[in-house]
């Protein structure tokens, strides 16, 4: 769970994996402890795809496909963790396998092994914005107390000596770095908040523009040709190898960009507009999971001395974790469960759009934080809560599978979930409550914006309720009781309420 939360914060499994490899090389973590953290890093990286899918939430069908494409990576990672973490805890499968591999090879340090590919293009720009002091980062990782209160931002770069010809004195000085934030004496937390907010704004803007461009370009016969080309299988008897070729392509492209988040986030809007099918994206995503492990492997090669062996071993654990997951959930078509689960999430989100936000909060924040808190309370508390919850969840899944495949063999009461309260087996009550709050707020601001009727544009209201002179009377009584006759007093108030009404469209 620490791996999930850390990767959610840095938005890159390659970065978090490299940090874990460095911590193992510095003997802050041992290999058995770092293996679950590596697994969590795989899960956390897929949150970026979900954010990308929100750019297509305006169209219900596109959002269905885009959210399914975003969560197919989640489902694969979660299923792999559930299976392989259990196997690892009981048998030590990854630890013993990588130990045998490391012991059979003589490893040598390669100081220049960690090559920069995409960073060569982005580093000149990022250096103009902010520069980090690598010595301070290394000092933090090694636990050196002399760096405890040092700033991570590098402000002074070049040192020089000024010699006075009059009195022969020598004055030592330094020059500020060329980055933007080196010019201001801001705290690290302040700089981090500013950069986070700016990056989110730029990310959202780029995603919206990318979706708009794709929608305008991929139409008509061009879209048909591209769709047939990208989703086509290999000819003849080689058709069964198409998925494995897609895995290879996804692996190579991810190695080039050195980020699985970038690669899979690029595919998500393509699936949303219907250019790539979910079945084709799935092997590409699996290939990106393999490609992202190369960053950790290259980082491990730079370790020296006795740390080299342990750092290479944890990097190999990451590689074989992903390979084992692919062997479980790809070769046999019946076992490609992530595709079906992702489609279910996509259909649910298309019907209840608020479910996407709930999924993000639960899967990437609340659930990891809850498990982390329980584990911090000790094994007794963790087992007391985890075992009953896991048993109930497993029983519910088993009954649900039986209802879908052999309903007639079940007892009458278990053939559906109607014996439970409605809110326990349906999202309708929650959706009704959310819609009630939304409509209540919409009616509060309807009179403030003359172009809106009952919280929606007038033309949409006429299409929905008819062209009657009394449109408000066609709404339920509970939603018409929140009508205010007062008009906005200032232009600022009108602007705020206008934006609020537009957001409820």
Image (tube, rainbow, N blue to C red):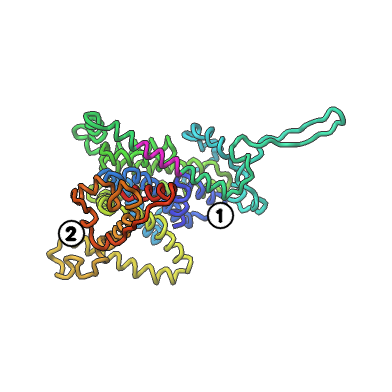
Examine the rendered structure and indicate whether residue 341 appears above or below residue 429: above
CA distance separating discs 1 and 2: 48 Å
Residue 344 % position (x, y): 25, 52
- Residue at position x 56%, y 53% from top? 27
Secondary structure under tag 2 reads helix
Residue 121 % position (x, y): 49, 32
Residue under numbered circle 2: 404
4 left or right of 167 in image: left
The answer to whether residue 249 is seen in the rendering is: yes
Q: Where is residue 365, by image quadrant?
A: bottom left
Residue 403 % position (x, y): 18, 62
- Residue at position x 84%, y 27% from top? 165
374 left or right of 143 in image: left
Residue 48 % position (x, y): 40, 46
Q: Quadrant of the N terminus?
A: bottom left
- Residue at position x 43%, y 47% from top? 491
Of residues 481 and 86, the one nearer the viewer is 481
Residue 297 belongs to the span the image colors magenta? no
Examine the rendered structure and indicate whether residue 425 appears above or below residue 496: below
Examine the rendered structure and indicate whether residue 2 appears above or below residue 297: below
Disc 2 packing (10 Å; few <14; some 14–19; many ≥20)? few
Magenta residues, as a range?
200-210
Which residue occupies the extreme top position in the image? 165
The answer to whether residue 73 is seen in the rendering is: no
Residue under numbered circle 1: 28
Q: Are marks 1 and 2 in contact (CB under 8 Å)?
A: no
Q: Where is residue 211, by image quadrant?
A: top left
Of residues 56 and 345, the one nearer the viewer is 56
Secondary structure under tag 1 reads loop
Residue 65 has which mark? none
- Residue at position x 26%, y 63% from top? 478
Nearest-to-viewer mark from 1 and 2 = 2
């Amino acid at each position: 769970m620490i791996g999930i939360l850390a990767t959610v914060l840095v938005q890159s499994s390659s970065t978090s994996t490299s940090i874990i490899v460095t911590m193992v090389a510095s003997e802050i973590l041992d290999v058995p402890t770092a293996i679950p953290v590596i697994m969590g890093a795989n899960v956390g990286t897929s949150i970026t795809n979900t954010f990308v899918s929100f750019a297509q939430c305006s169209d219900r069908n596109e959002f269905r496909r885009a959210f399914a494409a975003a969560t197919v990576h989640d489902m694969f990672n979660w299923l792999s963790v559930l299976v392989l973490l259990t196997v690892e805890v009981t048998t030590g499968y990854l630890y013993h396998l990588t130990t045998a591999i490391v012991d059979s090879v003589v490893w040598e340090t390669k100081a220049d092994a960690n090559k920069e590919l995409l960073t060569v293009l982005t580093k000149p720009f990022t250096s103009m914005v902010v520069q980090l002091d690598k010595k301070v980062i290394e000092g933090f990782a090694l636990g050196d107390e002399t760096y405890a209160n040092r700033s991570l931002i590098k402000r002074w770069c070049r040192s020089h000596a000024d010699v006075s010809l009059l009195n022969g004195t020598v004055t030592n000085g330094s020059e500020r770095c060329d980055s933007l934030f080196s010019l201001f004496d801001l705290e690290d937390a302040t700089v981090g908040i500013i950069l986070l907010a700016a990056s989110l704004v730029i990310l959202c803007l780029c995603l919206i523009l990318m979706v708009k461009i794709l929608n305008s370009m991929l139409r008509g016969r061009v879209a048909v040709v591209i769709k047939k080309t990208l989703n086509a299988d290999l000819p003849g008897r080689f058709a069964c190898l198409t998925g494995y070729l897609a895995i290879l392509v996804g692996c190579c492209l991810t190695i080039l960009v050195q980020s699985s988040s970038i690669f899979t986030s690029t595919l998500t809007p393509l699936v949303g507009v219907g250019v790539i099918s979910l079945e084709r994206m799935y092997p590409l995503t699996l290939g990106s999971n393999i490609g992202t492990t190369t960053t950790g492997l290259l980082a491990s090669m730079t370790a020296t001395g006795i740390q080299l062996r342990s750092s290479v071993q944890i990097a190999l654990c990451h590689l074989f974790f992903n390979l084992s997951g692919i062997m479980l959930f790809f070769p046999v078509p019946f076992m490609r469960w992530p595709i079906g689960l992702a489609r279910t999430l996509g259909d649910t989100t298309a019907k209840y759009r608020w479910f996407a936000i709930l999924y993000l909060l639960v899967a990437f924040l609340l659930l990891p934080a809850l498990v982390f808190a329980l584990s911090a309370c000790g094994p007794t508390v963790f087992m007391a809560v985890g075992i009953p919850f896991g048993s109930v969840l497993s029983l519910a899944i088993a009954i649900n599978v039986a209802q879908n495949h052999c309903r007639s063999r079940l007892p009458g009461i278990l053939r559906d979930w109607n014996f439970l309260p409605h809110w326990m087996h349906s999202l309708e009550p929650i959706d009704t409550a959310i819609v009630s709050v939304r409509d209540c707020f919409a009616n509060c601001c309807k009179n403030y914006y003359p172009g809106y009727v009952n919280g929606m544009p007038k033309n949409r209201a006429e299409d929905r309720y008819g062209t009657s002179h009394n449109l408000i009377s066609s709404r339920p009584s509970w939603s018409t009781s929140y009508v205010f006759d007062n008009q906005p007093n200032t232009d600022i108030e009108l602007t705020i309420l206008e934006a609020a009404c537009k957001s409820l469209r």
